[in-house]
Amino acid sequence: MSARETINGVLVYLFNEIWELEEQAIITEEFKDITNNDMHVIEAVGLEGNNMSAIAKKLNITMGSLSTAMNSLVKKHYAERNRSERDRRVVNIRLTAKGRKAYASHREFHDRMTDAVLAHLNEEQVKVLAQALENLTDFFKNYGKES
């Protein structure tokens, strides 16, 4: 098997495996009423909160899709909405105590995953991996945008 085939196989495997493992790790008995997608919306809201436009941009989804997800999170008491006093068109989102707890659970999973990878690498390997992952991120950000 060529290095190219190996890399492709690993990337496909990791994408699927991370999604499944993340769901198992963070959608616990305590958070069984939300999905993995909901958890990523919670992460995009962040501990400081954010407005709907910024959250949609961060997630690269439409305002309509975000509104649907946010309706569910508000109904389940993970987040709350408030209109800006300065500009009533702006809707600000903040996590509730329950939402902040879910955020912390999600962050813990990602920290454990990163720590597990870094534990087996020396400083030079970490730099090479970081550069490779930045290149992969650039590919995904620009995919379909080339003329």
Image (cartoon, helix red, strand yellow):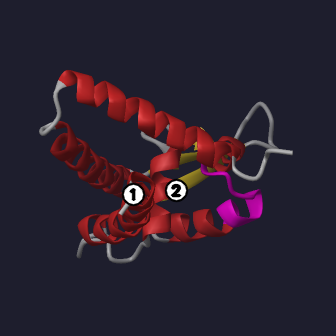
Which quadrant would residue 51 be assigned to in this image?
Answer: top right
User: What type of secondary structure mainly makes up the magenta span?
Assistant: helix
Marks 1/2: CA distance?
38 Å
How many C-alpha atoms fall within 10 Å of the one at disc 1: few (<14), some, or many (≥20)?
few
Q: Nearer the viewer, residue 86 or 10?
A: 10
Amino acid type, residue under disc 2 in the picture: Val
Q: Please state the extent of the stretch shown in magenta in the rendering.
A: 59-67
Q: Is residue 56 magenta?
A: no
Q: Nearer the viewer, residue 113 or 122?
A: 122
Amino acid type, residue under disc 1 in the picture: Ser
Residue located at (42% from left, 58% from top): 11
Instruction: Name above or below for residue 33 compared with residue 109.
Output: below
How far across and how far down the image is residue 25, in percent?
24, 66
Seen in the image, is 119 located left or right of residue 110? left
Residue located at (43% from left, 30% from top): 131
How far across and how far down the image is residue 18, in percent?
34, 63
Seen in the image, is 68 located left or right of residue 90? left
Q: Which residue is mark 1?
A: 2
How far across and how far down the image is residue 115, in percent?
18, 41
Q: Nearer the viewer, residue 29 or 21?
A: 21
Q: Label for residue 41? A: 2
